[in-house]
Image (cartoon, rainbow, N blue to C red):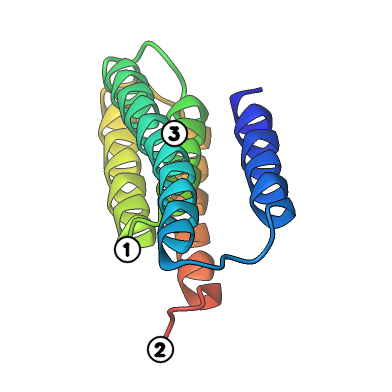
Amino acid sequence: MTRLFLATTFATLLIVTASSGVADTPASAEANLANRTAASAVLNGEDAKRLSNAELEYSARLAEFKDGRSPADVSIRANKRLLRAALMASSPNAISDYDQRASLIESIAEENLKLRTSTQRDVKQAKAARLSTLLLDALSPNAQ
C-alpha cells in the first residue's frame, strides 16, 4: 500500500514537473532537481526501512529455528524476504550475504538433526536454499 502511494506520488510529481514546461532559468532547473532528489530520498528511506524490518524478522525466525521452535522453511522464507529487501535497497553484497545466511541455516539444521530437534527434511530444504544461491549468483548481472 505504501509502495503504491509512493509510486502515485512520484508519478504526480513527474506530471506536475513536466506540465510546468521546460525550465527557462537555472533556478527553476535547480528546483526541479531538488524535487526529484526529495522524491528519490523518500523511496530510498522506504527501502532502508524495509531492509531493517526484514533483518529483524530474519533474526527472530533464525532464533526460533535454532531453539527448535520452528521448521527450517520459516527461516528460509525470512532469508528470501531479506534478500529481496536488500536487492531493492541496491545492497552490493545482497547475494553473498544471502549465501552466508543460507549456510548458517544449513549448519543449524544439521546440528538440530543431531540433537533431534530437526528433521531430515529441514536439512534438505536448507541445502536446496543454499544451492539456489549459486543460481542467483550465476544469473546476476554482476556475475563475472
* Residue 89 spot, x, y in % from top left: 41, 49
Tell me how far mark 1 sits from mark 2, CA to CA.
14 Å
Q: Earlier in the sequence, mark 1 or mark 3?
A: 3
Tell me how far mark 1 sits from mark 3, CA to CA.
18 Å
* Residue 112, above or below 48: above
Tell me how far mark 2 sits from mark 3, CA to CA.
31 Å
**Amino acid type, callout 1:** Pro
Badge 2 marks a residue whose secondary structure is loop
Question: Dot 2 surroundings within 10 Å: few (below 14), some, or many (20 or more)?
Answer: few
Q: Which residue is mark 2?
A: 144
Q: Earlier in the sequence, mark 2 or mark 3?
A: 3
Residue 46 badge = 3
Badge 3 marks a residue whose secondary structure is helix
* Residue 133, above or below 74: below
- Left or right? Give the position of 64 relative to 15: left
* Residue 60 spot, x, y in % from top left: 31, 18
**Quadrant that contains the C terminus:** bottom left
- Left or right? Give the position of 14 relative to 72: right
Task: Look at the numbered discs 1 and 2 and tell me whether their residues touch, using CB distance below 8 Å.
Answer: no
Callout in the foreground (1, 2): 1
Question: Dot 3 surroundings within 10 Å: few (below 14), some, or many (20 or more)?
Answer: some
Q: Residue furthest front?
A: 25
Callout in the foreground (1, 3): 3
Q: Residue at x 37, y 22 (%)?
A: 57
* Residue 75 spot, x, y in % from top left: 42, 29
Callout in the foreground (2, 3): 3
- Residues 120 and 62: in front is 62
Which of the 4 image quarters holds residue 107? top left
- Residues 88 and 24: in front is 24
Q: Which residue is mark 1?
A: 92
